[in-house]
Image (spheres, rainbow, N blue to C red):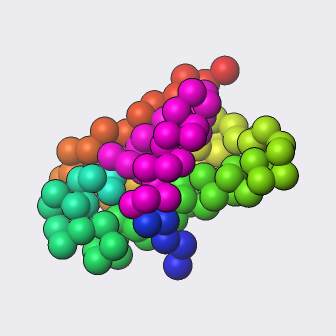
Amino acid sequence: MIFMNEYEIYDAASAYRSHPVLGPATQTLSNLAEWANANSDGWPYWPKPCRAAAKLQELIQTAERSSYRFEEPQVTVADYQAALRPVRAFRTRQGADFDIVEVDAP
């Protein structure tokens, strides 16, 4: 199972704040982690939100690996929207009220 700890999430949110796709992706993940912390034992201890965000975390980690090679992360709006599907389903099933940051399609 993919797992980004809270430090990694907030670090990525800071690093990609101005990126047109990764900025919203990292902010959404941060919002989910904060919601999990406020409504359960916490992000590290409740596997449901982490599983729902697995594709989102994978998207962010893949982009981070490309930055290690000094390449611009190639993340599309479609990639982000696909990664959001399980997050949206989780939010609906749990009645959660965290914000999902939208990206306008080009």
The x, y position of residue 93, in whole percent, is 25, 59
The C terminus, quarter of image: top right
- Does residue 8 show up? yes
Residue in view at x 74 percent, y 57 percent: 65
The x, y position of residue 8, in whole percent, is 49, 58
Is 15 within the magenta?
Answer: yes
Residue in view at x 33 percent, y 46 percent: 31
Residue in view at x 41 percent, y 34 percent: 101
- Does residue 84 show up? no
Labels in figure, total: 0
- The reply, left or right, for residue 105 in relation to residue 101 is right
Q: Is residue 105 above or below residue 60?
A: above
The x, y position of residue 19, in whole percent, is 61, 30
- The reply, left or right, for residue 86 in relation to residue 44 is right
Magenta span: helix, strand or loop, mainly?
A: helix
* Front position in the image: 105 or 31: 31
Is 39 within the magenta?
Answer: no
The x, y position of residue 88, in whole percent, is 38, 50
- Using the rendered view, name the quadrant where residue 61 is placed: bottom right
* Front position in the image: 79 or 73: 73
- The reply, left or right, for residue 92 in relation to residue 63 is left
Residue in view at x 75 percent, y 48 percent: 67
* Front position in the image: 80 or 93: 80
Extent of the magenta region: 6-31
- The reply, left or right, for residue 16 in relation to residue 46 is right
